Amino acid sequence: METFTVRDLRERTGELIRGAEEGRLSVVTKHGTPVFIAVPFDETLLREGVATALAVRLFDEEHVSLGKAAKMAGLSVGQMTDLLASYGIPVIRTTREELEQSLADFG
């Protein structure tokens, strides 16, 4: 998630728009305080609404946990898991090192 200041909006508007087109969230701040979030206008937003689209995006970018995303969207964890799966977003994200360590611990 990228942060823009109100001043940046004048000088970097194109960058904010390109980021949204690429599916990135951006926070706009005034004097260091968040004022608003620029949420990409995409299929998730159209189908699910702002709160759910924001929860999906924040989870996908690893800014919030699954439980927090579910709460933001007003869904159960199971419903959120199903929703994420419908968009091809994995719920469990294991790095190669974590997987290798788990296998070593197991065997």
Image (cartoon, rainbow, N blue to C red):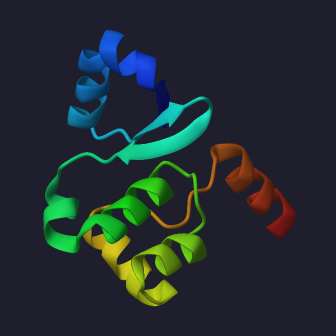
Q: Is residue 100 visible?
A: yes
Q: In the orientation shown, which residue stands out farthest toward the top? A: 11
Where is residue 104? Give x, y as percent: 82, 57
> At x 64% / y 48%, what residue is drawn?
95
Residue 23 vs residue 43: left or right? right
Instruction: Tell me if 26 is positioned left or right of 49 in this view.
Output: right
* Figure check: 52 above or below 44: below
Snapshot quadrant of residue 8: top left
Q: Residue at x 27, y 19 (%)?
A: 13
- Measuring from the top left, give residue 12's x and y in whole percent: 33, 14
Front in this rendered view, residue 71 or 36 = 36
Based on the displayed image, in which of its 4 quarters is residue 73 positioned? bottom left
Say which of 78 and 8 sits in front.
8
Q: Is residue 89 visible?
A: no
Residue 56 location, x and y as percent?
A: 39, 63
Seen in the picture, residue 89 relative to 69 is either above or below; the reply is above
| Image point (47%, 43%), residue name | 35
Give the vertical position of 15 relative to 64 (above or below): above
> In the image, residue 24 lies at what x, y percent?
35, 38
User: Hey, which residue is sitting farthest front in the picture?
Assistant: 31
The residue positioned 43% from the left and 78% from the top of the image is 81
Work out which quarter of the rendered image holds the C terminus and state it: bottom right
